[in-house]
Amino acid sequence: MNIIVATDIHGISAELRAMMEPVASGAIFLSPWETETSPIEDEHQAVSTFLSQSGLEAYADKISVAANRAPAYIIGFSVGASAAWLYSSRDDCNPESKATLFYGSRIRDYSSLVSRIDISAIFAEHEASFSPVQLARAITRANVRTSVETGTAHGFMNPRSANFAPALCMSHLQRLAGELARFRCSAQRTATT
């Protein structure tokens, strides 16, 4: 059983590691790039380059390799959340896996996919390119719970973002700690039976 953190377009930062360590000790951190951090400074250009190079599919492949067909708990941010959404519909995604996805804006391009796993998809209220409320409605299913955080913008979980919301981030981290504890217990029970 692995815990996988699929980062946003900026890649793996010291701030993200520090934020996640108390909650997801021993997690595997994945970057959307071949390196830990983005080779492109400008965020908009980084996103454009990433998407033009079939980045989401390649990132979903990275998640697949890290999970190795075993149950995994995936925590995704932005492009990491979108890649985890893609992975969740694949045959190699273990149906006992779970995911919490934060502001996966490119999920909108794959809203018809059917996830094999339980997902909590959390969106920011304000996005420049789409309506988070409409997307949340479109992907909600029995195994996909969605919410839209009032008064937030993309990046509310990222300490480096101008949109960082510390109190909300702490609330989500506390909830995530409980989810991960339940997931670990469930995985241990399954392994011993």
Image (cartoon, rainbow, N blue to C red):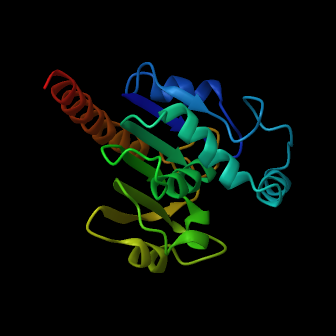
- Viewer-closest of 153 and 111: 111
Residue at x 64%, y 49% (from the top left corner): 162
The answer to which of 112 and 124 lies nearer the viewer is: 112
Q: Is residue 6 visible?
A: no
Q: Position of residue 79 (x, y in %)?
A: 63, 52
In this orientation, does residue 135 appear? yes
Q: Position of residue 146 (x, y in %)?
A: 36, 65
Q: Is residue 151 above or below residue 22?
A: below
Left or right, 165 with reference to 35 = left
Image location of residue 62, percent across then percent down: 62, 39
The front one of 29 and 162 is 29
Give residue 3's position: percent from left, percent from top: 42, 31
Residue 175: image quadrant is top left
Q: Residue at x 59, y 47 (%)?
A: 80
Identify which residue is drawn at 19% across, 28% down. 185
Horizontally, residue 110 falls left or right of residue 149, namely right
